[in-house]
Amino acid sequence: MVKKDTRKFKIEKVIPWILIITGVVGLLMSAVLIYDETQISHNPNYKPSCNLNPVVSCGSVIVSKQAQAFHFSNPYIGLVGFAVIVTTGVTILAGAKLKRWYWLGLEGGAIFGVAFCHWLFYQSVYRIHDLCPFCAITWIAVITLFWYTTYYNFWIGNLTLPDKLKPAGKFVTRHHIDILVLWFLIIAALILNHFWYYYGKFL
């Protein structure tokens, strides 16, 4: 368990809000993507509102095979998963104390989600060569969800670090926001680097 301190950031206070906010954002993005996919299936000429330029284009991502990684539309996973996240956050906010097994299950789901999002990022940028902004917002939500769910699980002792890694754990505790921002900056840099042929001409 990470030793608690008196700093302003209180993970036990903010974790329900993190779950609710990331869950709601994920639900909204999933719903929008399902709507656009439905419209495209009925009208191949339909242009999603996020088709902004040759790089930022949801349409080509939505109709790709990667958009159905498990032989059904990926956003349906989001509808179920994010609904659970929102419900969990509201339950905690109402005062419920969840069992360790539940938190570990949530951790497992978060690990799957963050791994899947990075796979989708790779497929979108380096295989499909288009960027879906609604997908990108979902990636941000999932990464944030994973980061602070993991933080919380270590904080309350559901997960523990070997003694040799405890100094690293203290470093992460002090710089959790910095690390998360760096994570997002790396993803943004990879995207900008790959699509520099388009965006470079505007700089």
Image (tube, rainbow, N blue to C red):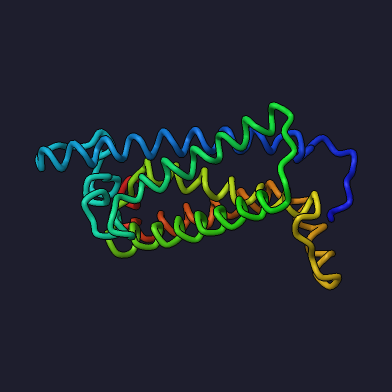
Q: Is residue 190 left or right of residue 9?
A: left
Q: Quadrant of residue 31?
A: top left
Q: Residue at x 29, y 53 (%)?
A: 72
Task: Measuring from the top left, give residue 59's x and y in whole percent.
Answer: 22, 45
Task: Measuring from the top left, give residue 131's x and y in whole percent.
Answer: 33, 50
Q: Is residue 82 left or right of residue 47?
A: right
Q: Residue at x 84, y 64 (%)?
A: 167
Q: Nearer the viewer, residue 192 or 100?
A: 100
Task: Measuring from the top left, give residue 55's x and y in whole percent.
Answer: 28, 49
- Judged from this view, the residue extending furthest toward the bottom is 164
Q: Is residue 66 left or right of residue 8?
A: left
Q: Residue at x 45, y 55 (%)?
A: 117
- Judged from this view, the residue extending furthest toward the top is 94
Q: Quadrant of the N terminus?
A: bottom right
Q: Nearer the viewer, residue 156 or 143?
A: 156
Q: How many marks?
A: 0
Q: Nearer the viewer, residue 98 or 127?
A: 98
Q: Nearer the viewer, residue 85 or 148?
A: 85
Q: Quadrant of residue 133?
A: top left
Q: Is residue 196 left or right of residue 6?
A: left
Q: Residue at x 56, y 53 (%)?
A: 110
Task: Measuring from the top left, give residue 171's x and y in whole percent.
Answer: 79, 58
